Amino acid sequence: MLDLRPYLGRWVALSAGRVVGSGRTPGEARQVGTHNQPGEPLKIGLVVAGNGGSLQTELPLGDLMTTLRPLLAESESPIYLVGGAVRDALLGRASHDLDFAVRDNAVAVARWVADALNGAFYVLDAERGTARVLHGDAVLDFARFRGESLLADLRDRDFTINAMALPAESTDPDAIIDPLSGQDDLAALLIRVTDPAAILRDPLRSLRAVRLAAELDFHLLPETGDLIRAASDGLATVSAERIRDEFCRLLIAPAGNPVRLVDQLALLPHVLPELLLARGVPQPAPHTLDVFEHGLLTLEQLNPLLRAIAFPPSDSHLQDALALAHDYLATYASHLEEHLTRRTADRRSGRVLLFLGALLHDVGKPSSRTVDEDGRIRFLGHEQLGEEIVRRRAGKLALSAREVRQVAIMVRHHMRPALLSQTHPAGRPTRRAIHRFFKDVGANGLDICLLSLADGLAKGTPPEPADWERRVQTVATLLDHFFHHYDRTILPPPLLSGRELMSELGIHPGPEIGRLLRLIQEAQAAGEVATVAGALTLARKELDKEQLSVFKGDSHVERSPN
């Protein structure tokens, strides 16, 4: 049996039962195969996971397209799958965002599809004839041709790799319509504009170019980069919502550091201008990077850190530090992944908010920087200033109030795991300290733990081994209590209600009741109180202390000269 595993995820050309060519696209595989076996019939297919690797001759378009195909074939007007879904199918990737181009009546087609799928439907732009269908996690957009023909539509798109179309009823790679040689650019790993005015027509395409390069691990053609720089000011005319959506997607791309490319293309002033103030702001040892570079490196460390927590790391200049993180934290990997993949009401993931918080965690440093007489650099209060800056900027990016709050909490409290690791022996904070941490930050404490680790890896040199182990141990202790001892340490069940407390102690309603209940809960979390009797004893002692304090205060007043 032919072993195709070395070609997993690639298109291959087979002749006489053996591989004679491979490539990133079916066209590239056919070209190589024809060169190696001229005149011989070739079988072209994509190698997918299976026993020894399985050959799939049809485009991998996903289960939803399998359901839609016979339905769309009934349409009187030709319907074409266009853009990213075609590109992703050629790359062997599943896509949950499907774009369809229709000669006419696109809104009616979308409504018809929504009814068939029992999905949500709404019109995006009645004048331009565009509508959207939501079905589970999938987003289906239907649009009237941009121009008089499909060819005009494809030429009006952003990049050549997105300017391909497939008849909606087809799964044949040879049926792809590719007037701008998008498959050649796919094979060359290039992002190329469809024409020199493509960015000017829609300046958001500049951010999309960065996002695609980062998601696919492609390169911008130099001419494309030049066009983006020349048109960068146009991004100021784009709505905050569109900038937010594109920027959030590029933030979590797995390849490289997309924000660095955003900066190099002169786009950062229109997305996160506050971040530019950090450029050239020096930091004291052990930092070797300025605040700007440190923020970018903190973001960059998150992906390898998250991979290392789940899988033993290899081939990294930080391998020892990442291996230690894996040893301590691997048991929490699935819990953390579940936390990061949760969706907000606006369909953004928790991962997006973590990455944004990591990028901005020190944004308050430039305005809080002071230099002592001995030359020591300080950033006192930068967390609080950073929180204020982040709240303003996240609001301008049109994040929801809940999302703004989550990112602001991360920035405000990002130093706490490191401080806990320094103030508790062997990096093992007490149950009281753990309770107070999560009481202040809630589930955002999980993000803060991950941010703290990425922060510790981003000083410009590998972390000092003893300091790093204490920090990792602290994070492991925090995660252990959150995931395994939540009811004991984080949020113990109440021993008394406010009404019961008032009845037992003979006190009246007021803020004192809430304070006593919080005190009892903290004592429970610390393991100091476990019964109703113990809770009442603690509350009585607290009241006695308060009354004694008031008495001493009154006596002091009486003895003071008038």
Image: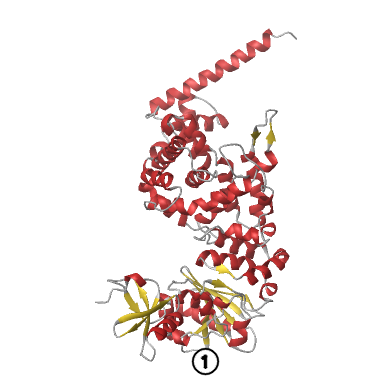
In the rendered image, the vertical position of residue 431 relative to residue 555, given as above or below: below
Q: Is residue 197 above or below residue 339?
A: below
- 315 on left or right of 444: left
Whether 197 is drawn above or below 288: the answer is below
Name the residue: 69% across, 48% down: 277
Q: Is residue 377 left or right of residue 16?
A: right
Q: Nearer the viewer, residue 370 or 240?
A: 370
Can the viewer see residue 360 in this picture? no
Q: Identify the residue at image location x=40%, y=49%.
A: 309
Look at the image and name its color scheme: secondary structure
User: Which residue is tagged 1?
Assistant: 76
x and y, in percent, of residue 172 in the image: 42, 85
Residue lying furthest right in this view? 562
Quadrant containing the C terminus is: top right
Nearer the observer, 275 or 31: 31
Q: Position of residue 523 (x, y in %)?
A: 44, 29
256 left or right of 382 in image = left
Q: Residue at x 29, y 85 (%)?
A: 16
Q: How many marks?
A: 1
At which x and y percent is residue 502? 49, 29
In the rendered image, residue 315, in percent from the top left (x then y), is placed at 41, 53
Nearer-the-camera pick, 418 or 467:
467
